[in-house]
Amino acid sequence: MVPNRQKPGRRAFLDGNYARRKHPVRAREYTIWDTELVGFGLRVRPSGSCFWTVRIRHRGKQRRVTLGRPEDVEAVLARAQARRLLAEVALDGLPKRTVVKATPSMNDYVDIYWTDIARYWKPSTAKRNAAAWRRDLAPVFGQALVADVSKADVIRWRDDCAGTAEAMYNRAIPVLASLFKYAEALHLRRKGSNPCRGMPRYKREAKERYLTPLEYRRLGAALRAAEARSPAHVAIIRLLLYSGARIAEIRDLQWEWVRPPHLALPDSKTGPKTIWLNSQALTILTDVPRRKDCPFVFPDKSGAAPLSMQFWWETFRRTCSMPDLRIHDLRHSFASTAIMDNVPLATIGKLLGHLLPETTGKYAHLSDDVIADAAQRISGTLANAIGLRA
């Protein structure tokens, strides 16, 4: 077989974000080649439309295979298809008896999946998905062959989770579904055989919890009492209260991201993010002592990692007589307070860093309550003005 050689030209690591960019249009079609997988590329037509492609050369003949449009075929799946086609060409011509088709176990396959897929995830996502496999999925599916896991197996696992592990199932099922989706792309399973397809999640009651005025006062008193013993932990909670930020955005904060009057985070759950700081939040940051040669605003004792909040919070919330209060509830409470102060939903969305209006829309019912209360007060005023009983 003649090696597959690419003409010199534009090269990039081809992922979904890169493929969806607007690429320069030329009079003739051209190809952007992948920097990692030789033969894998993105064709850009004069019309501006793009297609995944793989170029193979076998026995002196060159062939180009179109794998679909980026909006229809995910980058990781296109890459997997390209790798499979290139491998088939490399094996073509060898004695058939030497080609043994083996189906790996789920434990072995996960290593392949992680190598190919995890690079596209945020570190927090990779950590969460790895934990889901290791703790929740591997004990059930790890020894099974990839091709042998059936829908009945997944249903049986779901039934075993009923009542006691429903939240765990809801977190783990998307990871399992993604594993089988990629297995289909690698031809380790038949196309359309994903056993997780159509599997419903358990319905869970919404956990949005909003602090009442009394609870705010109780929380404030507890923070003042704890400040001498745990100043950094208390400062983190106060910043969360005043900013509506997510816990990781404040806990992992670095000094180089502090640019008054805002925080400029290079990455977050929704990508790069600006968090606007009010005067109270700015005062808190000003009072935080800065440790020499340490990038973190709230470092642990070693200075090599952010401060851990989990154990401290478990203890602290019991001292407030609010054992069910989650740190994320402070974010919900920030939004509800803004609603009560008649701040528009669109503005609240920007303060919270929501990318989509629908995300902020879950607070709309609070806005309705404010409007209804205002209508009632106005009607009462008018009734009194015209001499009617309100």
Image (tube, rainbow, N blue to C red):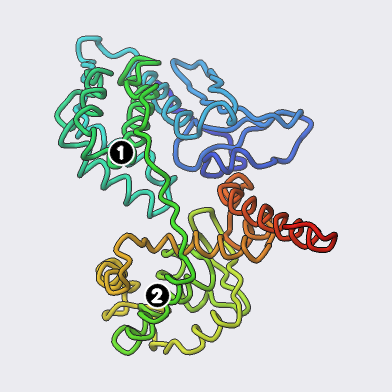
Which of these two is toward me, 244 or 180?
A: 244
Q: Is residue 2 visible?
A: yes
- In this view, the residue in front, 24 or 176, is 176
Foreground of the two, 66 or 304? 304
Judged by depth in the image, the label closer to the viewer, 1 or 2, is: 2
Q: Residue at the location (50% across, 65% down)?
A: 245
Q: In the rendered image of this protein, does residue 255 appear above or below residue 36? A: below
Local secondary structure at mark 2:
helix
The quarter holding residue 194 reads: top left
Disc 1 residue type (three-letter)? Ala
Q: Amino acid at mark 2?
A: Leu
Q: Which residue is mark 1?
A: 172
Q: Which residue is disc 2 drawn over?
A: 219
Asked whether the residues under the numbered discs 1 and 2 touch, taking CB atoms below 8 Å apart as contact, a structural biologist would say no
Tell me which residue sits at (59%, 75%) in the image: 277
Residue at 44 percent of width and 45 percent of height? 120
Q: Does residue 231 lie above or below 71 as drawn?
A: below
Above or below, 67 relative to 377: above
Q: Is residue 24 left or right of residue 363?
A: right
Residue 182 x, y percent position in the rendering: 37, 28
The residue shown at (57%, 60%) is: 352
Report how far apart the C-alphas of labels 1 and 2 lie in the structure. Answer: 34 Å
Q: Is residue 221 left or right of residue 30?
A: left
